[in-house]
Amino acid sequence: MSTEERISAGNTLVVHGVASIKIFEGKASILGCPIVLRRRVLVRPERAVPIYGETDLKLEITRGEESRLERYDCDTIPDNWAKVSDELIGGYRKVMVVGKSDSGKSSFSCYLANYALLHGREVQLFDMDPGQANIGPPTTVSYANVSAPLYDPFTLYVEDAAHVGYTSPSHGVPQCINAVRDLVTRATIRSSVDFSVVDSDGWVEGIEAERYKIEFARVCGMDAAVLIGVPPNSPLMGKLRELNIEVLQVDKPGALSLRGIDARRHLRSMGYRKYLKGARVRTLTISWIRIDSLTASPEASAQDYLRNIYCQMKQSPSPQNLWEASANSANKDVGLLSYAYDETGSFEGIGLVENIDLKRGYIRIFTPIKANIASLVLGCMILGKDGVEVYCER
């Protein structure tokens, strides 16, 4: 369904996906990103974009069945976003954005990256939320160099990534800290970009979450942190300041897209599909690559590790097990989500390991990677080739 819409100057139209937007008249922006006339803007499922009319606007919107529009007679971006962003780009290099899920932290991260870029800074955007990955594949942490203003980090392609293996750092704190450390170290060595925006995950409540965030900030070498939706009396603020990190706060945006578990899973499926696009089955010689596993002891063979996870999946007593949903779907092909690296330790991409045969010395993997794979880390999630999460070992 296509409709013609108009927005008055100073007002905002929030478009919930799936939708396609094309502006024919006027000047508009999304999270500080100027929108080019007649260039199509796509809104993903379970996402929303706030179109702000800097002048009167005329636009065409093509919407899916579940898409909807919300009108606001104001700018939904809080006034203090620009003020805080101006302060940050004036004297800081690494800025961590902290907030609960659906608090607007990813929107502010995008806004800050745009603000810095439009004010002459070179910008890297780090996506450190393995469960709601916008840049790299889900279950990883990643970053991308930002060369032009953006309205959705999903349009970026990963510069480098590191595997976590889980969709939340609470499921594997050591793995997540190690991944963050490896990624930041490689980024520092390879790039001279002078301003980094670090979009963290939404785990902020409780002592363990606070400890994790403090270690996260220390490992990343943060010199500033922006809190959004975090209470002013949170112990996290004092602990960050003890690390000599400047702490600032911004308000939540006027329009938020709240997502449940199913919506988050749907978004992750899109992320997996993005990084499995063009995949085919490759047969690799085991003796030519290093194979590690996320949770098994060093003594366990890769073949036994794979078999054990499949065995656990089939024996899971939960009636909500996603294996049942996958078994009833049109695409029944599944594999063990795994992570490939090159000789230098750089992230090459993901793949689904279908079989490991130690006797014959091969491993069969469904992956779009064409380059040489020097090392492969076997994860703990069974994933469908359609991007559906089937089972995850805990």
Image (cartoon, grey):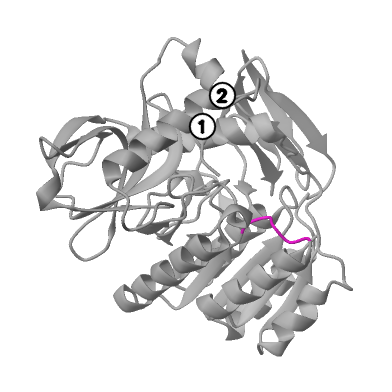
Quadrant housing the C terminus: top right
Q: Amino acid at mark 2?
A: Leu
Residue 23 visible in the picture: no
Q: Residue at x 21, y 66 (%)?
A: 344
Quadrant housing the N terminus: top right
Check if residue 312 falls in the magenta segment. no
The correct choice, above or below, for 105 with respect to 86 in the image is above
Reading the image, the residue beneath label 2 is: 322
The correct choice, above or below, for 13 with respect to 123 in the image is above
Quarter of the image where one finds residue 5:
top right
Q: In front here: 113 or 364?
A: 364
Q: CA distance from mark 2 to mark 1?
A: 6 Å
Residue 122 is left or right of residue 97, and the answer is left
Crowdedness near tag 2: few (<14), some (14–19) or many (≥20) residues, C-alpha within 10 Å: some
- Furthest-front residue in this view: 299
Reading the image, the residue beneath label 1 is: 391
| Residue segment shown in magenta | 201-205
Quarter of the image where one finds residue 264:
top right
Q: Secondary structure at mark 2?
A: helix
